[in-house]
Amino acid sequence: MREEEIKIEREKYTELSKKTSLLFFALTDLANIDHMYQYSLIWYKMQFNNACTNAEPCEDDDMKRIDNIYMTFLKLL
């Protein structure tokens, strides 16, 4: 792939990365309420990888695929 094509593909996932990073910081703030709510970045990344693997494929529509990943991720949390 050319550099420009990679950039275009990467930018498609920008909104997903913003949403999931906000969720991570919200979850880590829960530990301030009760120490029971302690999550590690390793656990969080594992859940995200599981969401990417288990989300319903959608080869003809990238935005639908990204939405599927996000919704699967929310269910895993």
Image (cartoon, helix red, strand yellow):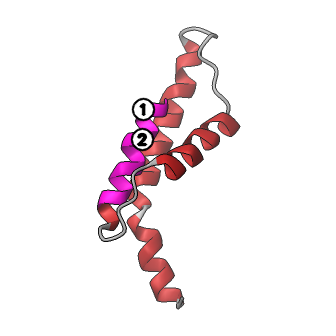
Q: In this rendered view, identify the residue nearer to me: 29 or 14.
A: 14
Residue at 57% in and 26% down: 28
Residue at 64% in and 41% down: 46
Q: Residue furthest bottom?
A: 2
Of the 4 image quadrants, the one containing the N terminus is bottom right
Q: Secondary structure at mark 2?
A: helix
For the residue marked with disc 1, what is the amino acid? Answer: Lys
Within-10-Å neighbours for mark 1: few <14, some 14–19, many 20+: few
User: Is 4 drawn above or below residue 18 in the view shown?
Assistant: below
For the residue marked with disc 2, what is the amino acid? Answer: Thr
User: Is 55 drawn above or below residue 77 in the view shown?
Assistant: below
Badge number at residue 75? 1
Kindly report the secondary structure that dominates the magenta region of the rendered protein. helix
- Side (left or right) of 49 relative to 5: right
Residue at 43% in and 62% down: 13
User: Is 20 drawn above or below residue 32 in the view shown?
Assistant: below
The x, y position of residue 9, in whole percent, is 44, 74
User: Is 4 drawn above or below residue 51 in the view shown?
Assistant: below
Q: Decide: marks 1, 2 in contact (CB < 8 A)? A: yes
The x, y position of residue 4, in whole percent, is 47, 87
Within-10-Å neighbours for mark 2: few <14, some 14–19, many 20+: many
Q: In this rendered view, identify the residue nearer to me: 26 or 61.
A: 61
**Span of residues in magenta:** 64-77
Q: In this rendered view, identify the residue nearer to me: 36 or 26.
A: 36
Q: In the rendered image, which residue does mark 2 sit on?
A: 72
